């Protein structure tokens, strides 16, 4: 019986192809927009998660600013609190802390081959333990040359964009880059990460950064590595407690922020989820328009098939049969829109990914999980079927004799 319903519906589509496709356009546009937005959002989320996962789950980040005021390195956010070397000593005294890395980050002028550009300068301690930790972080990997080591005061490792795209002439190994008036020899070129911040960076020893940036005591961020066998969350809690005592601040009024890499990933994901939901909500408007189009088409179909309905009921079709017939037809209209919408939506997201890659934003990637495909197909069928409920009920209520006489 179900196969009879579907064969009748497909026969109807063949006889009225133009109306069918015009009807599904609203659903098609809505599903395409939803798929494009979610696939891009999922792609960014996956890239961000992979980037943070590269730091490792045994890392803790300490930054100035209270809870909820997390600012990434190089941020221009207004933060009046400062981290000091005393904070570093306090952190190192906490049980479970293996090593801490001081980082100073600011935007600075860089000169090369007669051009002046702005870059993100990252100054970090370069002791043996720090270099060992850095060698295991994905986005710090050097493609050509070597990383910084002890004794490298006026040496620099630069990102892919700084090396290849920032200046008219590529910056190569042993070239000299002048940062805030001080000449640095380039000893390493980082591999391309796809992150604009990481690819536009210049990494130098923290002593040199403090000198050229005139920030002798400033620390932008402290990266903490947790000893094996200790929970990063527990160590972070203890660091926060000790820093409150050392800085003489009450709980809930901290002028610093302590987060684990897992907490950081969760925070970024929550923001991305909110953005995706908001965008999908806007795209959902077209789905409402599409559902109204399907409802209108189904009412028209009921009016056109009055005689057919009368004849079917006269030869034994029940109200349930008539209702199912129209519900399946409206559901299939929605499903058609869903299938084409998925194809168009993912194609659009891949086009955006391509344009972003050309512009240097390789972190923006399209990702189409199977769950999104299945959800889109089921949702489009259900929204189509729901739009056909009222027309289907109207068709089922027709009396055979009256239906044939009206026609």
Image (tube, rainbow, N blue to C red):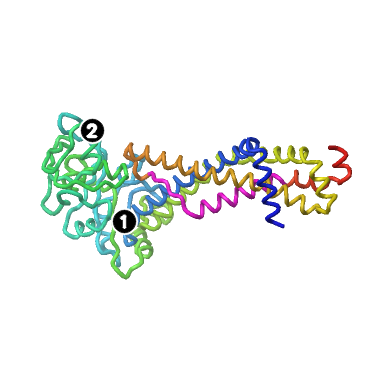
* SS of the residue under disc 2: strand
Residue 306 is one of the magenta-drawn residues: no
In the picture, measured across the screen, residue 30 lies left or right of residue 76, that is right
Whether residue 124 is situated above or below residue 240 in the rendered picture: above
Residue 117 numbered tag:
2
Spatial separation of the CA atoms under disc 2 and disc 1: 29 Å
Q: Mark 1 highlights which residue?
A: 54
Residue visible at 44% across and 42% down? Answer: 349
Q: Is residue 110 visible?
A: yes
For the residues carrying marks 2 and 1, which lies nearer the camera in this image? Answer: 1
The residue nearer to you, when weighing 374 against 11, is 11
Residue 24 is situated, as x and y percent measured from the top left of the image, at: 61, 40
Q: Quadrant of the C terminus?
A: top right
Residue 49 is situated, as x and y percent measured from the top left of the image, at: 38, 53
Q: Which residues are magenta?
A: 364-388
The picture quadrant where one finds residue 26 is top right
């Amino acid at each position: 019986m179900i196969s009879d319903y579907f064969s009748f519906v497909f026969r109807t589509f063949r006889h009225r192809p133009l109306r069918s496709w015009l009807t599904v356009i609203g659903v098609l546009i809505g599903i395409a927009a939803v798929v494009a937005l979610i696939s891009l959002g999922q792609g960014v989320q996956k890239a961000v998660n992979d980037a943070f996962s590269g730091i490792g789950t045994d890392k803790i980040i300490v930054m100035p600013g209270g809870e909820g005021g997390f600012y990434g390195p190089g941020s221009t956010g207004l933060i009046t609190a400062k981290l000091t070397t005393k904070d570093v000593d306090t952190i190192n005294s906490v049980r479970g802390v293996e090593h801490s890395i001081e980082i100073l980050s600011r935007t600075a002028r860089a000169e090369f081959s007669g051009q002046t550009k702005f870059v993100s300068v990252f100054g970090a301690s370069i002791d043996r333990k720090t270099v060992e930790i850095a060698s295991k972080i994905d986005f710090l990997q050097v493609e050509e040359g070597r990383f910084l080591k002890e004794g490298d005061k006026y040496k620099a490792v630069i990102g892919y964009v700084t090396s290849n795209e920032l200046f008219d002439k590529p910056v190569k190994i042993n070239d000299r880059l002048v940062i805030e008036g001080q000449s640095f020899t380039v000893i390493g070129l980082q591999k391309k990460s796809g992150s604009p911040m990481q690819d536009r960076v210049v990494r130098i020893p923290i002593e040199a950064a403090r000198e050229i940036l005139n920030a002798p005591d400033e620390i932008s961020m402290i990266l903490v590595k947790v000893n094996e066998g200790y929970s990063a969350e527990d160590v972070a809690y203890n660091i926060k407690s000790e820093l409150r005592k050392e800085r003489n601040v009450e709980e809930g009024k901290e002028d610093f922020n302590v987060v684990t890499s897992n907490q950081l990933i969760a925070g970024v994901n929550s923001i991305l989820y909110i953005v995706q939901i908001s965008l999908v909500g806007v795209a959902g408007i077209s789905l409402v328009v599409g559902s109204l189009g399907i409802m209108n088409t189904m009412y028209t179909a009921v009016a056109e098939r009055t005689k057919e309905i009368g004849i079917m009921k006269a030869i034994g079709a029940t109200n349930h049969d008539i209702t199912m017939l129209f519900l399946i037809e409206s559901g299939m209209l929605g499903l058609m829109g869903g299938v084409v919408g998925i194809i168009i939506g993912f194609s659009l997201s891949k086009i955006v990914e391509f344009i972003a890659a050309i512009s240097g934003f390789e972190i923006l990637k399209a990702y189409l999980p199977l769950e999104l495909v299945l959800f889109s197909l089921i949702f489009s069928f259900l929204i189509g079927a729901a739009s056909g409920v009222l027309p289907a009920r109207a068709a089922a209520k027709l009396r055979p004799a009256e239906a044939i006489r009206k026609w």
